[in-house]
């Protein structure tokens, strides 16, 4: 009986959907002041130099953005924080190390076209997707111009985004119901790139010899679009990018990517600060401090006890973290685990130990089911951020800490 009812409801849903789309659908980005989203993309990438395999990496890109201005024409000014972390194939089982961060600010109109200054290197892919002015029906196709803006500061000392233009080809495939019951429109996006650096032969010298001469490649994407929210729900991609330098070196990147876009709420509020402090006091936990900062809400476990000069937690500390874990389950944002040490030993050993201890705590939280692996990040600070003097034992105890941040950015 239940199966029959579900089948009838599904049929009604799709009949209504077809009826509602007789005139087509107008796809638009919707920008509402203070709306915040998170994109978590996972990239599996292989790199080749002159046709020889050199690296296989898994890359996580974490992007949090907030609409800070809303215009009358439906455009939105967006401030975004980008973080990229890369794990080589030989160490795939490690926790996700918090990587380099970038800030960006740009304007996007309802169709999806960006206005962004050259001082910002992110996002890399711009003006995808872009929607036409007219309503669309399944089977409709259209094209629009886009850009890949690559950060080549380190590899080629190019100090502005290296922009590679392309023409994207779109097709509105069909609609489908997500497992959560959302109506999503499935859109195919493909583009090829071929861009030749405009340097003239007489301008090629020792400084320009190793710059990109030709950049080419392709991207095949499938986008699941939530038109009710006016945003991407998730997407998949297959890609290949080849850079050929004036010195005839050939660098190729190829792989697959997938990403999920979610809304999230700020959790570093005064109310949550009081809630955590009260819960920690009721549990009888000591040497724990909770504070608000620019990243969110941070729980500092001071004087955390490991076996001597190691990253192995003592049993008493596991019991403490188990209690903290239960509190963390009441929040949903990603976690950043940061390890700190007192000023003892060499700078290198302190840095390595702080990273190892952060990873130990992160793995413990993952095993307890607090978050999935892709939602916990780690970093080590060594003894670079003391909160007390290293000249006293009490001060060193405070500096020997692990911080758990419930992230708003």
Image: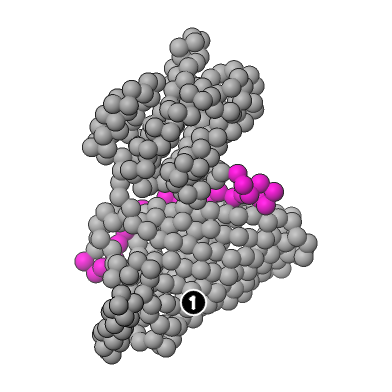
Left or right position of 405 against 68: right
The picture places residue 374, in percent across and down from the top left corner, at 50, 51
Q: Is residue 85 magenta?
A: yes
Residue shown at 39% from the left, 32% from the top? 323
The stretch of residues the image draws in magenta is: 72-94
Disc 1 designates what residue?
189
Q: Quadrant of the N terminus?
A: bottom left
Residue shown at 51% from the left, 73% from the top? 221
Left or right position of 407 against 249: left
The picture places residue 338, in percent across and down from the top left corner, at 49, 34
Whether residue 183 is visible, yes or no, is yes
Relative to 330, residue 260 above or below = below
Q: Nearer the viewer, residue 53 or 117?
A: 53
Q: Nearer the viewer, residue 86 or 96?
A: 96
The colour mode here is one colour
Q: Which residue ends up furthest to the front in the rendered image?
A: 1
Left or right position of 70 against 179: left
Relative to 226, residue 375 above or below = above
């Amino acid at each position: 009986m239940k199966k029959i009812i579900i089948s009838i409801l599904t049929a009604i849903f799709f009949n209504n959907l077809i009826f509602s789309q007789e005139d087509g659908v107008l796809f638009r980005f919707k920008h509402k002041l203070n709306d915040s989203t998170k994109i978590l993309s996972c990239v599996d990438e292989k790199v080749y130099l002159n046709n020889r395999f050199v690296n296989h990496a898994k890359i996580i890109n974490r992007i949090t953005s907030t609409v800070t201005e809303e215009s009358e024409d439906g455009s939105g000014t967006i401030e975004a924080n980008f973080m990229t972390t890369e794990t080589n194939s030989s160490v795939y089982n490690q926790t996700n190390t918090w990587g380099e961060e970038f800030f960006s600010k740009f304007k996007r109109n309802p169709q999806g076209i960006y206005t962004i200054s050259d001082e910002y290197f992110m996002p890399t892919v711009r003006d995808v997707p872009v929607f036409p002015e007219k309503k669309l029906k399944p089977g409709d196709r259209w094209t629009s111009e886009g850009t890949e803006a690559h950060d080549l500061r380190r590899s080629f000392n190019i100090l502005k985004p290296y922009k590679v233009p392309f023409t994207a080809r779109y097709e509105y495939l069909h609609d489908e119901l997500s497992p959560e019951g959302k109506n999503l429109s499935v859109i195919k996006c493909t583009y090829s790139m071929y861009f030749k650096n405009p340097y003239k032969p007489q301008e090629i010298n020792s400084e320009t010899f190793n710059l990109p001469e030709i950049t080419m490649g392709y991207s095949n994407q499938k986008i699941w679009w939530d038109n009710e929210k006016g945003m991407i729900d998730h997407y998949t991609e297959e890609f290949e990018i080849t850079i050929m330098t004036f010195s005839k070196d050939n660098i190729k990147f190829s792989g697959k990517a997938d990403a999920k876009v979610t809304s999230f709420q700020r959790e570093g509020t005064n109310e949550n600060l009081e809630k955590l402090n009260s819960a920690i006091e009721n549990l009888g936990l000591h040497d724990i401090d909770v504070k608000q900062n620019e990243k969110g809400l941070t729980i500092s476990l001071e004087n955390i006890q490991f076996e001597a000069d190691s990253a192995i937690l003592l049993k008493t500390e596991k019991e403490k973290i188990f209690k903290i874990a239960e509190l963390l389950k009441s929040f949903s944002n990603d976690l950043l685990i940061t390890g700190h040490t007192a000023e003892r030993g060499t700078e290198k050993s302190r840095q390595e130990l702080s990273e190892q201890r952060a990873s130990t705590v992160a793995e413990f939280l993952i095993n307890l089911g607090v978050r999935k692996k892709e939602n916990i990040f780690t970093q080590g600070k060594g003894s670079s951020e003391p909160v007390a003097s290293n000249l006293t034992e009490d001060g060193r105890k405070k500096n020997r800490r692990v911080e758990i941040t419930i992230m708003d950015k």
